[in-house]
Amino acid sequence: MRDKTHTMILAAAATMLPLCAGAGGHYIPGAEGIQAATAPPPGMYYLAYLINYNMDRFRAPGTSDKLAGHNRGTVSAIASRFAWITDQKVLGADYGMELLVPVARTSLTLNAAGVSDSRSGVGDIYVGPLVLGWHGQQWDATAAAGVWLDNGSTSSPASPGKGFKGTMLTGGMTWYFDSARTVSASGLMRFERNGKNGDGFRPGNQISLEWGLGKNFGTVQAGLVGYSQWQVSDDKGAGASNDRESRHAIGLQLDYPIPGAGVFLKGAVYKEVSATAGSNAYPKGSLLRLTIVKAF
């Protein structure tokens, strides 16, 4: 039981790296919410994602019993995203590109796995040479493609790197229920195909779905948000498991513009309501996110 517990706890620790980790890939949902599938108009943009993820609900595999000892993990991170949406059209959409650079501080205290570690550093960088944004009278749609690099350190359990490259494909749509665009529903899906690490191990591919229901109240926007994530193929290589991971969360979001500064603030809180790995319970967490959007 201890060996299986040790493996699951270390795997769970890897899921706590915002925007550079997940149930098997790099991306962890919760970064987007209301109007998640709406690309901005042509221009240069900087987005700072400030994220805190806390995990303290660890259960023994196959049971609902809490693991003995002090077991918790916390990640504080800032991910800088640079986006350029051009005036060029591709398939009727505005064409753009993006770059994401995450920096994280991770603290792990997992007595059940014999781990106590804290690290700070640059995580794996995402390079997106293809971003497409379509805009209709009462709808927006987006599609994107890019790669995750393996530049982040993997020297310890709390290191920010994943140790392998990955390809990510994105698609989604936002629908507005009125011509004034004051009420919206959106869904954004990302598919990741993971590569092998230095030991020949390949995590299973994963799908992430983020959704949001929003309503404008003057200049302020608020609504219900959530995410789901599924591992859709088995791990391969030494130590591979047939247990496929999944997690689901729900939360609230509030958006507030600062027109004079050309800045938009987006805050959200998420609570994971379900997390499993095959038939086993999986550690659940809560996520706080503040996004600062600056248009140039």
Image (cartoon, rainbow, N blue to C red):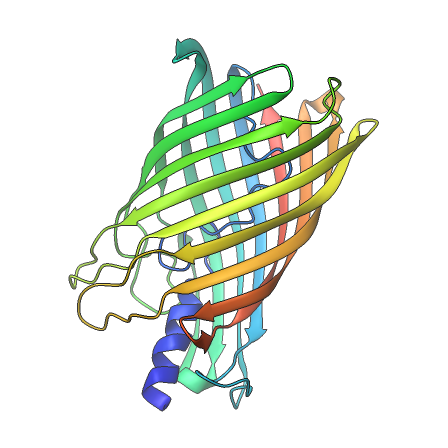
Q: Quadrant of the N terminus?
A: bottom left
**Which of 186/295 is in front?**
186
Split into 4 quadrants, where in the image is the C terminus?
top right
Q: At which x and y percent is residue 251?
A: 67, 53
Q: Residue at x 37, y 62 (%)?
A: 159
Left/right placement of residue 153 relative to residue 285 reads: left
Q: Is residue 293 above or below residue 11?
A: above
Nearest to the observer: residue 222 or residue 99:
222
Q: Nearer the viewer, residue 97 or 209?
A: 209
- Does the rendering let one see residue 26? no
Residue 221 lies left or right of residue 143; in this view the side is: right
Q: Position of residue 125 (x, y in %)?
A: 36, 43
| Vertical relation: 266 (above or below) 115 | above
Marker count (numbered) = 0
Image position of 15 (left or right of 184): left
- Above or below — where is 103 with respect to 4? above
At x 64%, y 55%, the residue is: 250
Q: Is residue 164 above or below residue 243?
A: above
Among the 4 quarters of the image, the one containing residue 12: bottom left
The answer to whether residue 164 is seen in the rendering is yes
